[in-house]
Image (spheres, rainbow, N blue to C red):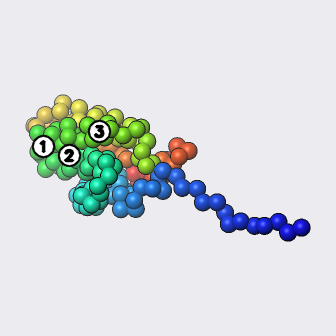
Amino acid sequence: MNVPTFPPRVVRTDLDRLPDAVKHGIDLFNHREFMESHHVLQRVWHAEHDPVRLLYQGIVQIGAAALHVQRGHWRQALTLFERAKPKLERFPPVFLGVNVERLTKDARHCEELVRDLGPDGLPRCDLEHFPVIELRDRGGDPQSSPN
């Protein structure tokens, strides 16, 4: 008796649903290329009409906060952290493979550091203190790293 063969089953994870441009923007963010990340993610955010655009916008705002830290703009950096918070907090802990919970927690910690340093101490802020955006597949295994 001939046993039929079937093509391998393709299983899509949440991470598979994350647009490639967003993955690229996150990779740039994680490599501390905040300006380039900002440009990539801003294009996606502006083109998106679904509420997921708030996730992209929140990430853009955290990256923009990093740019303001680099430029010595203390108040603007804090404003962007504040604006990003309510956007990110709308999402579950892991959404489309993005570990939103960790990003939110790390951004809050970075905001506290920037606030504590004050405008005069901002030059001492190392951008390595900025969050790394972790991507996870459905099983919880990390899919990207900062290096």
Task: Give me the disc on residue 76.
Answer: 1
Mark 3 sits on what residue? 107
* Residue contact at pointers 3 and 2, CB within 8 angstroms: no
Q: Is residue 121 left or right of residue 53?
A: left
* Residue contact at pointers 2 and 1, CB within 8 angstroms: yes
* Residue contact at pointers 1 and 3, CB within 8 angstroms: no
Q: Position of residue 41 (x, y in %)?
A: 28, 57
Residue 134 visible in image: no
Q: CA distance from mark 2 to mark 1?
A: 7 Å
Dot 2 falls on a residue whose secondary structure is: helix
Q: Is residue 101 left or right of residue 109?
A: right
Kind of residue at badge 2: Ala
Q: Considering only order in the chain, which callout, 1 or 2, is on the residue closer to the N terminus?
A: 2
- What is the crowding at mark 3: few (fewer than 14 residues within 10 Å), some, or many (at least 20)? many
Residue plotted at (47% across, 52% down) = 15
Q: Position of residue 103 (x, y in %)?
A: 35, 41
Q: Residue furthest bottom?
A: 2
Kind of residue at badge 1: Gln
Q: CA distance from mark 1 to mark 3?
A: 15 Å
Q: Position of residue 48 (x, y in %)?
A: 29, 57
Which of 105 and 52 lies nearest the eye of the viewer?
A: 52
Which of 145 and 53 lies nearest the eye of the viewer?
A: 53
Q: Position of residue 22 (x, y in %)?
A: 35, 57
- What is the crowding at mark 1: few (fewer than 14 residues within 10 Å), some, or many (at least 20)? some
Mark 2 sits on what residue? 65
Q: CA distance from mark 3 to mark 2?
A: 10 Å
Dot 3 falls on a residue whose secondary structure is: helix
- What is the crowding at mark 2: few (fewer than 14 residues within 10 Å), some, or many (at least 20)? many
Q: Residue furthest right?
A: 1
